[in-house]
Amino acid sequence: MGKQYIYINFYAPIIPQSVSILMQIVQNSLQEGVDRIVLLISSPGGQVAAGLSLYNFLKGIPVDIETHNFDSVDSVAIVVFCAGQKRYCVPNARFLLHGIGFDITAGTRFEEKHLEEKIKDLKMDKANIVKIIAENCKKTEKEISDDIHEVKVLNPEQAKDYGLVHEIKKDLFPKDAQVININGPWQ
């Protein structure tokens, strides 16, 4: 019996709801004997914790993973993209590296200790993101950290030189492929 493939179109932000759906699809596919997952990604990024969890999940499962940027992979979605052993993008894709932060509600008051804790959290999240990207491309942690700080946008050729992309190709899947879509009205 040949390899069994699954194609998943992830057109969503990286948030707990979308990540949970993707993980469930992957788990069900593993039980059905799938041994290769092609994850088509277009995502504006989202929550760092959700992205790191998804990356660790995808890297830890016993199947081949391919990722394919079919439009824009931004922010923590780059971490998820790095889960692919083979990584592709379409000729007019882009990648966006930028700093991380946190949202606050109006009227929120911070004590010094709470701000110090938030800064430690941000630094740890950035260090994890930098380490993951460095492990999967041709740049040092310092170079990636600097690029994140300065905000870097990569076109396909630049992403290939950077080591994020192995090949630029327009074909996403074969004509007869069944594609599972993950998209929703998430805010």
Image (cartoon, helix red, strand yellow):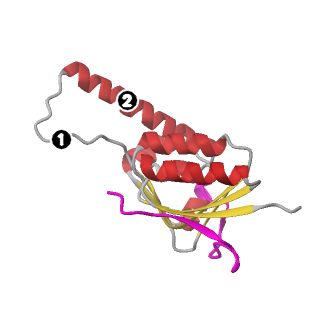
Rendered residue at 46%/48% (across/down): 76
Residue 168 falls inside the magenta stretch = yes
The three-letter code of the residue at mark 1 reads Thr
- State the image coordinates of residue 98 (x, y, percent, origin top left): 39, 50
Q: Which residues are magenta?
A: 161-187
Q: Nearer the viewer, residue 120 or 27?
A: 27
Where residue 36 appears, as percent x and y from the top left, is 73, 57
Query: Which SS type dominates the magenta stretch?
Result: loop
Disc 1 is placed on an element classified as: loop
Foreground of the two, 134 or 77: 77
For residue 46, side relative to residue 132 (left or right): left
Q: How many marks?
A: 2
Q: CA distance from mark 1 to mark 2?
A: 18 Å
Residue lying farthest right?
1
Q: Secondary structure at mark 2?
A: helix
Q: Residue 167 at x, y = what percent?
A: 67, 65
Q: Quadrant of the N terminus?
A: bottom right
Quarter of the picture holding the C terminus: bottom left
- Residue beneath label 2, please? 121
Q: Residue furthest top?
A: 113
Q: Is residue 159 left or right of residue 174?
A: left
For the point 63% across and 72% down, the residue is: 172
Which residue is the site of mark 1? 105
Residue found at x 65% / y 71%: 178
- Residue 3 drawn at (x, y percent): 82, 60
Residue furthest to the left in view is 107
| Residue 13 sits in quarter | bottom left
